[in-house]
Image: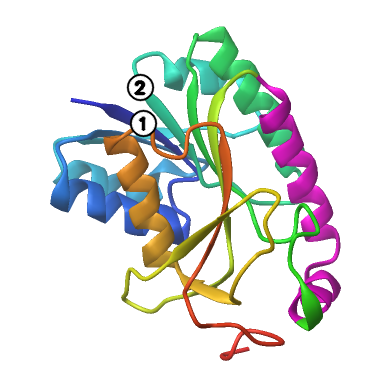
Amino acid sequence: MAKVLILGANGKIARLAEHIFVDTTDTDLKLYLRHAERLRDFADSHTLAEAVEGDATDANNLAEAMKDVDLVYANLAGDNIETQARAVVEAMHAENKTRLVWISTLGIYDEVPGKFGEWNKKVLGDYITNYAAAAKVIEDSDLDYTIIRPAWLTDKPEVDYEVTQKGEPFKGTEVSRRSIAQIVVDITQDPDKYSRESIGVNKPNTDGDKPAWY
Protein backbone atom coordinates (compact mmCIF):
# COMPACT_ATOMS: atom_id res chain seq x y z
CA MET A 1 0.00 0.00 0.00
CA ALA A 2 1.51 3.31 -1.13
CA LYS A 3 1.74 6.49 0.90
CA VAL A 4 1.53 9.86 -0.86
CA LEU A 5 2.58 13.26 0.46
CA ILE A 6 0.37 16.02 -0.96
CA LEU A 7 1.97 19.48 -0.84
CA GLY A 8 -0.51 22.34 -1.02
CA ALA A 9 -3.18 19.90 0.08
CA ASN A 10 -5.95 22.50 0.32
CA GLY A 11 -5.74 23.47 -3.35
CA LYS A 12 -8.73 22.80 -5.59
CA ILE A 13 -7.09 20.04 -7.64
CA ALA A 14 -5.56 18.51 -4.53
CA ARG A 15 -8.92 18.40 -2.74
CA LEU A 16 -10.48 16.59 -5.71
CA ALA A 17 -7.56 14.15 -5.79
CA GLU A 18 -7.91 13.49 -2.07
CA HIS A 19 -11.53 12.47 -2.49
CA ILE A 20 -10.65 10.21 -5.42
CA PHE A 21 -7.92 8.60 -3.32
CA VAL A 22 -10.19 7.81 -0.38
CA ASP A 23 -13.09 6.72 -2.61
CA THR A 24 -11.20 4.49 -5.04
CA THR A 25 -7.83 3.44 -3.55
CA ASP A 26 -6.25 2.21 -0.34
CA THR A 27 -3.47 4.83 -0.55
CA ASP A 28 -2.32 6.47 2.67
CA LEU A 29 -2.31 10.28 2.44
CA LYS A 30 -0.19 12.82 4.25
CA LEU A 31 -1.71 16.27 3.68
CA TYR A 32 0.84 19.08 3.94
CA LEU A 33 -0.42 22.66 4.12
CA ARG A 34 0.25 25.92 5.94
CA HIS A 35 -2.91 25.76 8.05
CA ALA A 36 -3.59 22.12 8.89
CA GLU A 37 -6.90 22.88 10.58
CA ARG A 38 -8.43 23.47 7.15
CA LEU A 39 -8.24 19.73 6.46
CA ARG A 40 -8.43 18.41 10.02
CA ASP A 41 -12.04 17.28 9.65
CA PHE A 42 -11.23 15.48 6.39
CA ALA A 43 -8.21 13.78 7.95
CA ASP A 44 -10.11 12.84 11.10
CA SER A 45 -12.92 11.26 9.08
CA HIS A 46 -10.63 9.12 6.92
CA THR A 47 -8.33 6.65 8.65
CA LEU A 48 -5.81 6.72 5.80
CA ALA A 49 -5.35 10.52 5.87
CA GLU A 50 -3.17 12.66 8.11
CA ALA A 51 -2.88 16.48 8.10
CA VAL A 52 0.56 18.03 8.63
CA GLU A 53 1.24 21.75 9.01
CA GLY A 54 4.21 23.29 7.23
CA ASP A 55 5.50 25.73 4.64
CA ALA A 56 6.62 24.47 1.24
CA THR A 57 9.72 26.69 1.33
CA ASP A 58 11.00 24.95 4.50
CA ALA A 59 13.22 22.14 3.22
CA ASN A 60 13.83 20.71 6.70
CA ASN A 61 10.13 20.49 7.50
CA LEU A 62 9.43 19.04 4.06
CA ALA A 63 12.10 16.39 4.59
CA GLU A 64 10.56 15.42 7.92
CA ALA A 65 7.16 15.05 6.26
CA MET A 66 8.68 12.88 3.51
CA LYS A 67 10.29 10.28 5.74
CA ASP A 68 7.68 7.54 5.32
CA VAL A 69 6.16 8.31 1.90
CA ASP A 70 6.54 6.68 -1.51
CA LEU A 71 5.58 9.56 -3.78
CA VAL A 72 5.34 13.35 -3.51
CA TYR A 73 2.56 15.24 -5.28
CA ALA A 74 3.15 19.00 -5.32
CA ASN A 75 0.09 21.18 -5.88
CA LEU A 76 1.86 24.46 -5.09
CA ALA A 77 1.36 28.06 -6.18
CA GLY A 78 2.59 31.59 -5.57
CA ASP A 79 5.19 34.08 -6.73
CA ASN A 80 7.83 32.05 -4.87
CA ILE A 81 7.10 28.83 -6.77
CA GLU A 82 10.76 28.52 -7.85
CA THR A 83 11.87 28.71 -4.21
CA GLN A 84 9.33 26.04 -3.33
CA ALA A 85 10.63 23.84 -6.14
CA ARG A 86 14.19 24.13 -4.84
CA ALA A 87 13.04 23.25 -1.31
CA VAL A 88 11.12 20.21 -2.56
CA VAL A 89 14.11 18.92 -4.54
CA GLU A 90 16.43 19.49 -1.57
CA ALA A 91 14.10 17.67 0.80
CA MET A 92 13.59 14.74 -1.56
CA HIS A 93 17.34 14.36 -1.94
CA ALA A 94 17.78 14.49 1.83
CA GLU A 95 15.29 11.65 2.30
CA ASN A 96 16.29 9.66 -0.80
CA LYS A 97 12.86 10.08 -2.37
CA THR A 98 12.62 10.07 -6.15
CA ARG A 99 9.04 10.08 -7.48
CA LEU A 100 7.50 13.53 -7.85
CA VAL A 101 4.32 14.75 -9.55
CA TRP A 102 4.50 18.51 -10.08
CA ILE A 103 1.61 20.69 -11.23
CA SER A 104 2.76 23.51 -13.51
CA THR A 105 0.94 25.52 -16.18
CA LEU A 106 0.65 25.78 -19.94
CA GLY A 107 3.04 28.01 -21.87
CA ILE A 108 6.24 27.41 -19.89
CA TYR A 109 8.06 26.29 -23.06
CA ASP A 110 6.32 28.81 -25.32
CA GLU A 111 4.51 25.72 -26.65
CA VAL A 112 1.02 27.21 -27.01
CA PRO A 113 0.47 28.10 -30.67
CA GLY A 114 -1.51 30.75 -32.48
CA LYS A 115 -3.81 33.42 -31.13
CA PHE A 116 -4.53 31.39 -27.99
CA GLY A 117 -0.81 31.29 -27.25
CA GLU A 118 -0.56 35.06 -27.66
CA TRP A 119 -3.60 35.58 -25.43
CA ASN A 120 -2.33 33.13 -22.82
CA LYS A 121 1.06 34.82 -22.66
CA LYS A 122 -0.51 38.27 -22.35
CA VAL A 123 -2.94 37.26 -19.59
CA LEU A 124 -0.55 35.11 -17.52
CA GLY A 125 2.58 37.25 -17.95
CA ASP A 126 5.09 36.69 -15.13
CA TYR A 127 3.07 33.72 -13.90
CA ILE A 128 4.45 31.76 -16.86
CA THR A 129 7.99 32.99 -16.21
CA ASN A 130 7.85 31.91 -12.56
CA TYR A 131 6.40 28.50 -13.33
CA ALA A 132 8.93 27.96 -16.12
CA ALA A 133 11.76 28.64 -13.68
CA ALA A 134 10.28 26.18 -11.18
CA ALA A 135 9.86 23.51 -13.85
CA LYS A 136 13.49 23.94 -14.87
CA VAL A 137 14.54 23.26 -11.27
CA ILE A 138 12.58 20.01 -11.38
CA GLU A 139 13.84 18.98 -14.83
CA ASP A 140 17.45 19.77 -13.96
CA SER A 141 17.25 17.46 -10.94
CA ASP A 142 17.76 13.72 -10.99
CA LEU A 143 14.25 13.09 -9.66
CA ASP A 144 11.78 10.77 -11.35
CA TYR A 145 9.33 13.57 -12.07
CA THR A 146 6.12 14.08 -13.98
CA ILE A 147 5.35 17.73 -14.75
CA ILE A 148 1.69 18.33 -15.58
CA ARG A 149 0.84 21.42 -17.65
CA PRO A 150 -2.94 21.87 -17.60
CA ALA A 151 -4.90 24.06 -19.96
CA TRP A 152 -7.15 26.70 -18.40
CA LEU A 153 -9.04 24.97 -15.64
CA THR A 154 -12.78 24.42 -15.26
CA ASP A 155 -14.88 22.92 -12.47
CA LYS A 156 -16.80 20.64 -14.82
CA PRO A 157 -17.50 17.25 -13.15
CA GLU A 158 -15.86 15.24 -15.92
CA VAL A 159 -12.73 13.29 -16.77
CA ASP A 160 -12.04 14.06 -20.41
CA TYR A 161 -8.52 14.82 -21.58
CA GLU A 162 -5.74 14.26 -24.05
CA VAL A 163 -1.99 14.61 -23.56
CA THR A 164 0.81 16.32 -25.46
CA GLN A 165 4.49 15.90 -24.76
CA LYS A 166 7.20 18.51 -24.28
CA GLY A 167 8.31 19.63 -27.72
CA GLU A 168 4.82 19.23 -29.20
CA PRO A 169 2.38 22.11 -29.73
CA PHE A 170 -0.15 22.43 -26.92
CA LYS A 171 -3.71 21.49 -27.87
CA GLY A 172 -7.03 22.93 -26.79
CA THR A 173 -7.75 25.75 -24.35
CA GLU A 174 -9.32 24.17 -21.25
CA VAL A 175 -9.51 21.06 -19.07
CA SER A 176 -11.35 20.13 -15.89
CA ARG A 177 -9.66 20.09 -12.51
CA ARG A 178 -11.26 16.68 -12.08
CA SER A 179 -9.29 15.39 -15.06
CA ILE A 180 -5.99 16.63 -13.62
CA ALA A 181 -6.82 15.10 -10.24
CA GLN A 182 -7.54 11.76 -11.88
CA ILE A 183 -4.22 11.81 -13.72
CA VAL A 184 -2.41 12.43 -10.43
CA VAL A 185 -4.17 9.49 -8.77
CA ASP A 186 -3.51 7.26 -11.78
CA ILE A 187 0.22 8.02 -11.62
CA THR A 188 0.37 7.10 -7.93
CA GLN A 189 -1.20 3.74 -8.76
CA ASP A 190 1.20 3.18 -11.69
CA PRO A 191 4.38 5.14 -10.89
CA ASP A 192 5.97 4.35 -14.27
CA LYS A 193 3.22 6.31 -16.00
CA TYR A 194 4.60 9.54 -17.55
CA SER A 195 7.95 8.97 -15.82
CA ARG A 196 10.48 11.77 -16.55
CA GLU A 197 7.92 13.47 -18.79
CA SER A 198 6.38 16.93 -18.97
CA ILE A 199 2.85 16.55 -20.27
CA GLY A 200 0.39 19.11 -21.53
CA VAL A 201 -3.20 18.21 -20.69
CA ASN A 202 -6.34 19.55 -22.38
CA LYS A 203 -9.92 18.56 -23.12
CA PRO A 204 -10.23 17.45 -26.75
CA ASN A 205 -12.00 19.73 -29.21
CA THR A 206 -11.62 22.90 -27.16
CA ASP A 207 -9.45 24.79 -29.64
CA GLY A 208 -10.03 28.53 -29.87
CA ASP A 209 -8.53 31.96 -29.40
CA LYS A 210 -9.22 31.69 -25.65
CA PRO A 211 -11.21 29.41 -23.31
CA ALA A 212 -14.90 29.42 -24.20
CA TRP A 213 -15.93 30.30 -20.64
CA TYR A 214 -13.50 33.20 -20.22
In the rendered structure, the answer to whether residue 24 lies left or right of residue 66 reads left
| Residue at figure coordinates x 64%, y 51% from the top left | 77
Secondary structure that dominates the magenta span: helix
Question: How has the structure been colored for display?
Answer: rainbow
Q: Which mark is residue 70?
A: 2
Whether the magenta-drawn stretch holds residue 91 is answered as: no
The dot on residue 191 is 1
Quarter placement of the N terminus = top left
Residue for point 48% across, 33% down:
195
Q: Position of residue 14 (x, y in %)?
A: 41, 52
Q: Amino acid at mark 2?
A: Asp
Identified at 25% across, 55% down, the residue is 19
The correct choice, above or below, for 204 with respect to 64 in the image is below
Asked whether 14 or 173 is in front, the reply is 173
Check the image and name the residue furthest to the front.
168
Dot in front, 1 or 2: 1
Q: Is residue 178 visible?
A: yes
Q: Would residue 39 be found to the left or right of residue 132 on screen?
A: left
Mark 2 lies on a secondary structure that is: loop
The boundaries of the magenta stretch are 116-141
Q: Are marks 1 and 2 in contact (CB under 8 Å)?
A: yes
| Residue 58 is at least partly visible in this image | no
Q: Nearer the viewer, residue 60 or 211?
A: 211
Q: Helix, strand or loop at disc 1?
A: loop
**From the image, which quarter does the C terminus lie in?**
bottom right
In the image, 63 versus 157, the foreground residue is 157
Residue 37 horizontal/vertical position (percent)? 38, 46
